[in-house]
Image (spheres, grey):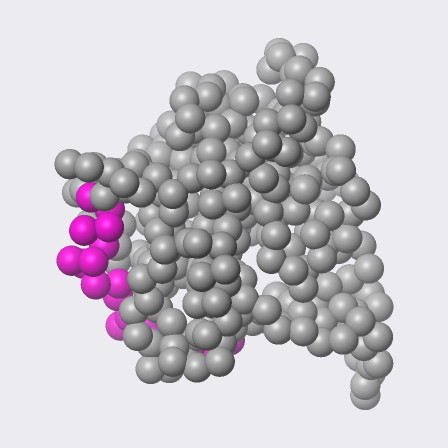
Amino acid sequence: MSRDTDVLVLGGAGVDTIVHVPELPLPYADSYMIEDGIRTRAGQTGDFVALGLTALGLRVHHLDFLGDDPEGDLVRALHDEHGIALTAVPQPLGTKRAVNLVGPDGRRLSLYDTSRGHADDRLPEDTVRTLAGASRHAHVSITHPCAGALPVLAESGVTISTDLHNWDGENPYHEAFALAADVVFLSATALADPERTMRRIAERGRAEVVVATAGAEGAHLLTDGELTHVPTVTPPAPVVDSNGAGDAFAAGFLFGRLNGEPPHRCAQYGSVAGAYACTVPSTRADAISRSDLLASAAAAPSWPAAQFPAPLRGAGEP
């Protein structure tokens, strides 16, 4: 079977409204004056992964629900602008949307509108099967309709990745995604015992690689039973916003994996892409190019895994 698509991205299409606030958490007040403006742009997790992969030269197809509304038009325009193939399943309840409060240090608080979906929403199995059959890899967002697509993807033989984001290691909803994927990304932020969670994913599921990102501390890579620390990469410009950094990391990592690179090199690509994303204001949709990623990775210090122990910290630890 011909696989003309490098990565099928499922779910995670929507719009964000960006509000720059003076601090997080935001103290109660009757009102705030927002000097930077309040801006709505297309781009949630699936959109950003698709954008990042496309900027790196991979052939991408994005599948998700979209409404016939102004928000859906923004998502369609983003895909058209960047040449990303999009299959939109009609969503009468409207396109997913969120409000992101962004602090001066680039941290964010996201408020998701859960009214734009239904508990019975499922991506059409025939569509998933057809697109997966034409793809080398599938990246699955943890948005609700994607859960039902996991068995279909497994039957198709395509390799799978997912991002659990700020999973606490306990919520059963995330486990179905974690155990069905060959590559699992997650944030260490909410994990009481990151190493235990990473090893449990690898032992109970099909994951060959588990990566826990840890912001300014870098990331942690588990592969072949060995846990190593992935050092940070110096951003090419001042850090302005962490929004989309995890999606960029995933795109960079998958770019390396689909090009046959070993896991530590894939993780380095992810770090470079994530660092670049932190220099992009949240009001823009932008991603590092293939040439810039390769040049930055080549210029970065080499990091033999043995030289970098993994100082894993749990939630709330200093």
Tell me if residue 38 comes above or below residue 259 in the rendering: below
- Left or right of 32: which side holds 89? left
Tell me if residue 315 comes above or below residue 210 in the rendering: below
User: Can you say which quadrant of the picture contains the C terminus?
Assistant: top right
* Residue 293 visible in the displayed image: yes
Q: How many marks?
A: 0
Tell me if residue 91 comes above or below residue 263 in the rendering: below
* Residue 114 visible in the displayed image: no
Q: Position of residue 126 (x, y in %)?
A: 15, 58
Depth check, front residue: 35 or 134: 134
Q: Residue at x 73, y 63 (%)?
A: 102
- Left or right of 259: which side holds 292? right
Q: Residue at x 76, y 68 (%)?
A: 20
State the image quarter where residue 219 is shown. top right
User: Furthest residue to the bottom?
Assistant: 30
Q: Which segment did they paint magenta? A: 113-133
Q: Residue at x 31, y 42 (%)?
A: 5
State the image quarter where residue 33 is shown. bottom right
- Left or right of 60: which side holds 168? right
User: Can you say which quadrant of the picture contains the N terminus?
Assistant: top left
State the image quarter where residue 12 is shown. bottom left
Q: Position of residue 70 (x, y in %)?
A: 49, 80
Q: Position of residue 217 (x, y in %)?
A: 71, 35
Q: Position of residue 283 (x, y in %)?
A: 67, 64
Magenta stretch: residue 238 in it?
Answer: no
Q: Residue at x 38, y 43 (%)?
A: 59
Depth check, front residue: 24 or 4: 4
